[in-house]
Image (cartoon, rainbow, N blue to C red):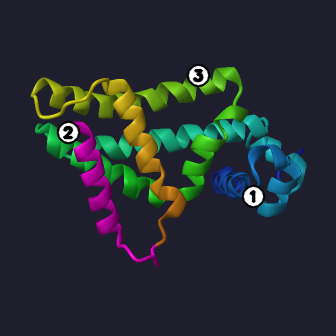
């Protein structure tokens, strides 16, 4: 099927991904049809297949792009040789990066179950790369006798789960500023790895 007049892949492709992101976050992947995504973008349903093979590919692309952006942004931060400073930086980065992308975060965690096994395996590799960065910080702190952690892998998963919780309750109009929230979480994480 031909593209609708005036549509261009560099414009329509991103619009399709943006529409899918919003619909998946609001209604869940399983409840959203390609027809709904097309309607949101303003193209015929058949035209979507000029930009994506299917809904699964769209979900995978959203998750994959999110993880690549996350890893890239973390990699741009200045290297902290001191493990305490590195952990502090990671905490602040994680909270702020994720709060700016609530739909992407929701999909990245809640829609993993809807990925095919092949797509899940690829996303899992990227997730582990991110987790390995935090675990590396904890291991360095353990080696330097700055941190006391019984199991660095479990501590890594626990810290990330705790940080992800901010996304469920934080509101900019709430009683705490983002700086205050970040400080509270830093204090909780610091205490959990040093006491």
Q: Which residue is mark 1?
A: 7
Disc 2 is placed on an element classified as loop
Is 5 placed above or below 191 here? below
Question: Does the magenta segment cover residue 34?
Answer: no
The C terminus lies in quadrant: top left
Disc 1 is placed on an element classified as loop
* Mark 2 vs mark 3: in front: 2
The N terminus lies in quadrant: top right
Residue at 64% x, 53% y: name it.
14
Q: CA distance from mark 3 to mark 1?
A: 34 Å
Within 10 Å of the Cα at label 3, are there few (<14), some (14-19), or many (20+) other Cα atoms?
few
Within 10 Å of the Cα at label 2, are there few (<14), some (14-19), or many (20+) other Cα atoms?
few
Confirm or deny contact between disc 3 and disc 1 (CB under 8 A). Answer: no
Sequence-wise first label, 2 or 1: 1
Q: Position of residue 112 (x, y in %)?
A: 64, 35
Question: Does the magenta segment cover residue 186?
Answer: yes
Q: Which residue is mark 3?
A: 121
Which residues lie in the magenta part? Answer: 172-194
> Quadrant of residue 133 in the image?
top left
């Amino acid at each position: 099927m031909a593209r609708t007049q005036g549509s261009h892949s560099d414009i329509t492709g991103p619009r399709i991904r943006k529409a899918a992101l919003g619909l998946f976050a609001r209604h869940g992947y399983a409840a959203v049809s390609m027809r709904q995504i097309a309607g949101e973008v303003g193209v015929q349903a058949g035209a979507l297949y000029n930009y994506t093979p299917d809904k699964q590919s769209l979900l995978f692309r959203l998750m994959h792009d999110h993880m690549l952006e996350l890893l890239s942004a973390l990699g741009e931060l200045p290297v902290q040789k001191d493990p305490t400073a590195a952990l502090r930086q990671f905490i602040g980065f994680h909270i702020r990066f994720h709060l700016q992308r609530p739909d992407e975060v929701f999909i990245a965690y809640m829609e993993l179950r809807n990925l095919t096994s092949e797509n899940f395996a690829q996303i899992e590799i990227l997730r582990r790369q991110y987790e390995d960065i935090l675990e590396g910080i904890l291991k360095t702190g353990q080696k330097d006798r700055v941190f006391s952690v019984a199991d660095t892998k479990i501590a890594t998963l626990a810290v990330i789960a705790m940080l992800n919780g901010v996304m469920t309750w934080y509101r900019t109009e709430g009683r705490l500023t983002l700086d205050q929230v970040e400080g509270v979480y830093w204090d909780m994480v610091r205490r959990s790895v040093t006491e």
